[in-house]
Amino acid sequence: MEETLKKIREEALSALDAQDCNVEEIRIKYLGKKGELTSVLRSMGQLSAEERPKMGQLANEVRATIEEKIASLAEKQKEKALFEALEKEKVDITVPGRKQKLGKLHPLTQVQREMEDIFIGMGFSIAEGPEVEYDYYNFQALNIPENHPARDTQDTFYITDNILLRSQTSPVQARVMEKQQPPIRIISPGRVYRSDEVDGSHSPLFHQLEGLVVDKGITMGNLCGMLETFAKTMFGENTRIRLRPHHFPFTEPSAEVDVSCFVCGGKGCRLCKGEGWIEILGAGMVHPNVLRNCGIDPDIYTGFAFGMGIERIVMCKYGIDDMRLLYENNVRFLEQF
Ligand code: PHE
């Protein structure tokens, strides 16, 4: 039996020495339940009481030696596999990276925020109102009763007889004045709607920015000064403004406001169509009827209001000649801003 045990040890160890041997197969062959060492141990019963412990000890030693060798070999093979895997997955860290494409804000949003910053710098705060609006706030409170001709130029989409998509940001004026006594100094940017056909300068959805100041002793002079500051900050230090008499039902007197062309400086060019001036907004002193409609006493308070299209400002600023470009989401166009 001693011979058999030693032979098993020798064979198992030399099998394990072979290159790329299958360790698990060898373990089963020698140490497994039906393995060679196990069957030797089974026949131990036939030995004499004297020999049994000796052989038992030898058998244990043989098992331990083989197990040890298997364990160290398994460890080595695992390391080797890991090394090979790492070798295979090696990345070349010297390859230049792929450039990440960063998104950016739409030019309309950029310009809207720029305008907001300018007015916030002058002490205005931002007020918001609903895009789905009552006829009352969009028209009646603003001194535009039913059948008033001004409704024609601001035809919009009706949801019911007295609920519509707002055609201007001016209803926010009325909503703010209703809730708050002067001093009031707000701007209100947002989407507005009109039932216009799409062309290079019209869209059924566009954006406006409204402004309203109401306090004791507010004059047209305040309006002019504020507009001039806005124009110079937005379009450059040399920009001048010009007011032309106009009519809005909710302001009196009313004016359309032009800025001197910031491309040609007023000489006349393609952008200003030879005029030297570019119209950018409507403005005026808040009509006493509007103040009264909103619970503000026109004998104590006066105010001015203005409203401008944000698309128009963007188009002027960047020399864009077709408004549709702002809505088409063509990345090659938008990337430029
Ligand atoms: N709401 C006017 C429009 O859309 C603009 C405006 C606002 C005019 C405030 C005067 C005062 O045409």
Image: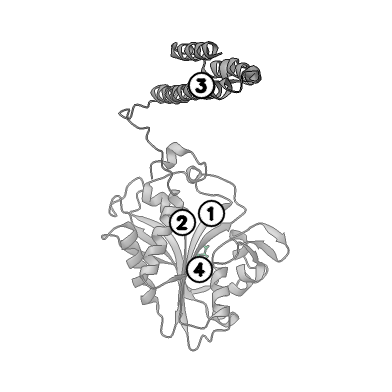
Task: First in sequence, mark 3 or 4: give its number.
Answer: 3
Mark 1 = which residue?
206
- Toward the viewer: 103 or 81? 81
Q: Nearer the viewer, mark 4 or mark 1?
A: 1
Identify the element where label 3 is drawn. Answer: helix
- Toward the viewer: 168 or 277? 168
Mark 3 = which residue?
58
The answer as to whether callout 3 falls within 8 Å of ligand 1 is no
- What residue type is disc 4 on? His
Spatial distance from mark 3 to mark 4, Cα to Cα? Answer: 116 Å
Colour mode of the rendering: one colour
Q: Residues within 10 Å of mark 2 (few under 14, many from 20)?
A: many
Spatial distance from mark 4 to mark 1, Cα to Cα? Answer: 22 Å
Q: Nearer the viewer, mark 3 or mark 4?
A: 3
Question: What number is the disc on residue 191?
Answer: none
Q: Position of residue 113 (x, y in %)?
A: 42, 58
Q: In the visual, does 86 lie left or right of 133? A: left
Question: What residue sits 52% from the left and 25% below the top?
Answer: 57
Question: What residue sits 37% from the left and 27% below the top?
Answer: 91
Mark 4 = which residue?
247
In the displayed structure, 336 sits above or below 132; it is: above
The picture quadrant where one finds residue 121 is bottom left
Q: Position of residue 13 (x, y in %)?
A: 46, 15
* Quadrant into which the N terminus falls: top right
Task: First in sequence, mark 3 or 2: give its number.
Answer: 3
- What residue type is disc 1 on? Phe
Question: What residue sits 52% from the left and 11% below the top?
Answer: 3
Question: What residue sits 55% from the left and 19% below the top?
Answer: 27
